[in-house]
Image (cartoon, coloured by chain):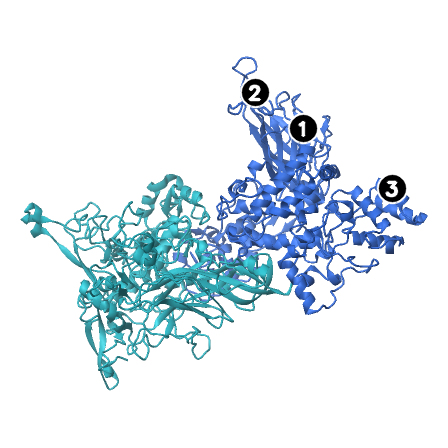
Chain colours: A blue, B cyan
Amino acid sequence: MDTDVLTVAYSRVKAILDQAAGDSAADYGGAGRFWSRGARALEDAEVFGIRMVAPVPAGHACCQPARARSDASGLIKGLRGEAPFDGGRFPPLPWGGRAVAPADIAVIADWIDAGCPDDATSVAVALDLRDPAATIRVSEIAEFAVSADGYLPASGAGEPRRRMNIDCMSEPQLNRLRRGFRQLYALNRWPEDRRSYNNQALIHQNHCQHGWERFLPWHRAYLYEFEQNLQDFEPGLMLPYWDFTMPEYRPEEPDKGRIIPNALKAYLTVEAAETLVAALDPAPTAEQKRAIMALAQERALFSSQHQFFCNLITGIGYTAVTPDPANANRQRIIDALLESNALWYPLRYPAEYAGGGTINQVIHYHYPSADDIAQILSLNNFRDFGGGSIYDSAFGFLDQNPHNTMHIWTGGQNPDAGQAAYVCTPNHAATAAPRSHQETARLRALTLRRNDAAQINGRRFHARSDLYSQPGLGDMFSNLTASYDPVFWPIHVNIDRIWAEWQKLNPNALPADLDAVLSPWNYTIRDTLEIAPFGYEYVRSSHFMPVGLEAPVSRFLSQPIDVPQAARSFKRAEIRLHQVPQLMRSCFVRAFLNDPGADAATPIRGNPHYAGYISIFGHGACYGGPGHCDLPPPQKRTFDQRERSHNTPRVHRIDVTAAARHALAQNGPLQITLVVIGGDYLEERELLKLEGVSISFLD
Amino acid sequence: MATYRIHPGIGIARLGNSDTEFYLAPETPAALPLACDSFGNPLNGPDGVTPVPVKTFKDAQGRVKRQAARFQIFVYDETSPEGRPLRVGDPVEGGGNHGVLVDIQWRVYVANKKASWYPFTELKGEHGYAPGSPRRNAGVTGQDRDLLIIDPGPRSVNATTSRRAHFDRSGGIGSYATTFPPKGLQPFDIDTLGEMMTDDHGRLIVLGGHGHSGMDVSGGGSPKIEDYANTDGWYDDISDGPVMARLIMYSEQVGQNRYVDVEFPAWVVVGYPRFAPQILDMITMDEVLHDLYVRQFATDTGIYGMLGTYDDPQHIDFRDEAALRHWRAGRLAWNRNYRPWFYRDIWPILFRPDEFRYLNDILQQSNYPHDQAQRGTFDPDKLAQTPRRTALAGDLETEAAAPARDASQGEAVMLVAQSAGPAHRSKAEDPYGPMRRFLFDLMRRAGESNSFQVQDRASSRVHSLPLMPLLCGDNPLTNETPSKFLHLTEYQLFILGQWARGWFINEKEEGWLPTGYSPFEPYPKTPPTTGHALDRGVLSNVLGGAFCPGGELGWVMRNPSIYWAPYRIKADRSVSDFLQSAAQANQSQGSVIADYTFNVEQPLSQDNDFDTGLQPGDLTKYMGLPWQSDFNECTTQPINITYADWNNLYPDSDGDGRLRRDEKTWTTLWWPAHRPLQSFEIASIDDGQPNYVWTTWSRGIPQIPVGDLKMVTEWSKLGFIVRNPYQPGAKAADDLTYKYISVERTADRADPASEAS
């Protein structure tokens, strides 16, 4: 619609209002039938001090919303029954008579927006909605790329590290995570090394807190401790969170969704597939070999070993494998899958329940939806949200479902347990077969006393023999075994994230017993109430571009950033300038998105690429002697107890939410331009230094 | 997403000595209570939906029926932002589950903390008690003080399998270790604080005690009362406490029941009987709270808010203390452009004083200063008339109104607007303007609580006349923080001030009044449809001052620290909520009715902790003990008006004969609608037409402590004062000479024939 002609005449407006008013004698505060005395009189009419027709909005017409004038008019508000005509100050208009139909209200609104023409004239209004096309110029400046593994350098002292959404992480970031886990698995060879994966998992088995208010504080400390362990090997590595309510998981019919994050699924790398193909006995046919190699090349993902084996047997046709834990081919395959993905775990049967039923049918629990989480976030006291002070009486909603549910969802019930051969159904989501009451009761009891179902005795966790075994339930099913499965971490990080979100909404809602110690550490509940001391924050997706402090930057231009699909539904987007040292002179930094040619002269008003600015206050020339304004070292010297150096680099933030939404609506990548502008409004070329730039998308 | 709230936020039950019979609390102002069956199901009229009012206030044995507080759950969601009642069978969601409502579990925990609290000494304690202030029963010390609290423990019921529970000595099915006064109190033992049940729609019905008050005379002697509000050794069965609810839904999704609690507890308060239920107090508790929320919590910033923001009102969260503090520090003022409605906002205030003429000699035998007839000062037709403009819109606009909306000119502008008055176009014709201004000028303002008149002041507005309302204030008794006379709330005064200026709307002129409206039945009669309206309607029948200590509740209700939301008391959730969490009920597949009681870490507190919230008994503990003593004495008070700031003068110490001769007092009413003094009664009936006698309401009971002791046994014999069924119709008072009559006075057993109606 480029042009629209409105030809509503005053007489039409008067007729509508006359008809609605009927024979009402309402006085309208002395104004009487204010609409019946001509267009100019109506335009000027007031009832009890309220302008019936709002004045023409100030400012240029192009910047006004289409219906600004009629929406602000008392007559239109009154006819619609909007405040102050909602019955509090005044009843809806007209007073007496009967209501005006919405279509007729629209007619009157059109008349107002057309400038209240009287009958002698009709007005044509041209609505020009032309988008000011931005002229893109090609940059001649070096573009900065996202750092190879996406993580901040470890030197960013004082900055919280970012726990990210596992579904928004890049392959290099995920591989770093896998490396970290492998390092801890490798330590299992030294049973007395407390850092080993098994010893870390044993902490949960022996000390974990559920069903009361220690649940959230204890796990916050546990995640932090485990994360520190990982960072011993992979500096700066952070645990990711799994937002299991994202649309990809189809919470309303979760068995048709992604089931678990792709990063945690079974797949074959090409190297592992080559080894496997060579080892299988009897050897697969050439066609089968090609099919197995194709699995690797295409990075085919399987949510459980059952899915993989059934694909191998019924899809590829290689049948020399049985569920028997001693079956050599099965062992070779599990070896290959473990070799390929350190985050995959064989004793994990997500979405698989007895008789092929769903979690709702078999366990009487339902997969959590975003609505469910919103409801839980709306709870207004800690007991209901996170648990009360009485063990065995005071479950919190977050603990019960989603937490318990996600354990049961990812643990699952092993369809291959006790089977002589793989039973593969084409449609896995078949309805559950009818079961005896006894069996129903047994399965229901599993949800109450999940630990009773766990097998601990005689197991050598993460030993091959254990990983080949065929237990009835996944390890996630029970508290005693849960954290042996790496999926434990992203689930619990997400629970911790939901708690952190809730804490922002309810800063004063606290657990009852703040002094309780969280064994086996020395944290008390009180120590866990803030995440800042633990040094992390939650972002959906974050992209760091190193710059370096060596030379000043006048303009920063990123290479196009590939923002993951799952990160595009953020609530807030933020650009950060990391570790900016004190500047001599004051400046602005303007941010533009997808406007690589932006410079100091690029208009900002009405420019959808303009994302925001910060102003940095100049520190002035150094009045001290040599070294007075040197950058302090990233970490204080030992025993240096003095207050923070005045020259400590800062982090500056720019909220770019609106512009980022606009830029990502085009579905392409994102490119950041930062322009440094001095007090003279010209580009400032010799001023800003920084270690890097990041853009983060927050939930 | 849906939110579930219990309404009313504060429900009012009333004592009665009838064993089993009760009626439901009225939910509109000055309405009769509603008749109900023994489960609290309202009795409906012939159309099957309209509830019928109660017919008799006493049972067949002449005992006062109790008034039940009824609570129900409202759902707030996208389709009903104002809320709608929730019914069994409705879809519900919460805590991450959704299903169909199959049952409601209710939990009530009431207690009586009067005997352990501080004695009531007028305003002392309103802003905290000095360290070392003595308590009631100060001779009881240490752990024994816990025994002074009547603590029956919590009780739960549901709408299906377990529908009734008693706040008695038994501890209920949860076997709570209760604390009750020792047996052998004189004249009455206290064995229960009441009971709770569900009606057929799952609504909660809460009953209070039986009006049993007694003194522990185990030390010998006989019971006596020495003070209007505090006598050691006494207990009564008044109580209050939180009301919590749990929704039980059947989840089709998982084939099981799921549980979620409502947003926050409500509160039940037990008061003494409302003997004149159809006559409103000059200030109701609803008006006290509304005024508090508007001024302290920014709940109506279009009326009271930052200058210049009225047309685009600020929204500040009720619990955002920092934002509210910032707001209160701002340039706040009443919106002088706000136009109250005459029949909705103004007349219901002006209507009330004339009603008191049926409750006491002082007004009945005088010249009817509040007469609403055509010759009277309170003729609604005259008071409703707006200033008429001689010219219509568009003419002669003066500049006066324009700066009135310019906040930058601040207070000066308000004076301009005031002097310009409503006639911002041209000179107004306003024949009744002087009458309105006269009535408003008579109103006592804040800061004039101790002023009988203001004629020798520069602020004098009227000649020689006492300021109104001429009712007792919070402290007409002592020289410490005296507050001799009542003044209307700031909101009421603002409304009347706008009216006096002619800045109001006459709904009749605008055609907004429903057909059949009569100014002589000015209060809304349609049952409330929203939770907020229910909150307000219920509290409109509760006394809103003076608080010395008051009727049902006292000055603690003016304290902003005790609220969680408008009309919702901030409960200490460690005692208000179900001990087993709702998520635990999900986990263990069932919610327990016998609330676990093993986890009582602390007995009910002897102290306040407003930061945490209120406990059972924390609202009524401020009231007189036993309640009958203060109730009996609150008829009239001779107030010494010689010097504004002094209630008690001592001319003798100075040998000051001049002072003795100059001393002046005024015999002032307390609150006749809660404590009538005189009334009409039917003396005889000839040919179906009654003959009336004007008589003392409580006979043979002097207004001194000796009478207080009599009242402990006599209160249930008093008559209830109701609209005279022989003189129906909505007419001005002097067309209905016997508008209200006392009925159902319980006569001596020996003479049952004389029992009224």
Disc 3 residue type (three-letter): Thr
Between tags 3 and 2, which lies in front?
3
Q: Mark 3 points at which residue?
A: A275
Report whether residue A368 is seen: no
Provide residue A573's location: percent of width, then percent of height: 62, 39
Q: Within the image, what quadrant is residue A33 found in? A: bottom left
The single residue placed furthest to the top in the displayed view is: A625
Residue B123 in the image, given as x and y percentages of width and height: 26, 51
Q: What residue occupies the far bottom of the structure in this picture?
A: B687
Which amino acid, mark 1?
Phe
Task: Kindly give the residue lying farthest to the front in the view shown.
Answer: A458
Q: How crowded is mark 2: few (under 14 residues within 10 Å), some or many (20 or more)?
A: some
Q: Which-is-in-front pick, marks 1 and 3? A: 3
Q: How crowded is mark 3: few (under 14 residues within 10 Å), some or many (20 or more)?
A: some
Given residues B149 and A146, the one toward you in this image is B149
Q: Which numbered disc flags the more N-terminal residue, 2 or 1?
A: 1
Do the CB atoms of the residues marked 2 and 1 lie less than 8 Å apart? Answer: no
Q: Are marks 2 and 1 on the same chain?
A: yes
Within 10 Å of disc 1 (Cα), the crowding (few <14, some 14-19, many 20+) is many
Quarter containing the N terminus of chain B: bottom right
Q: Pointer 1: what residue?
A: A556
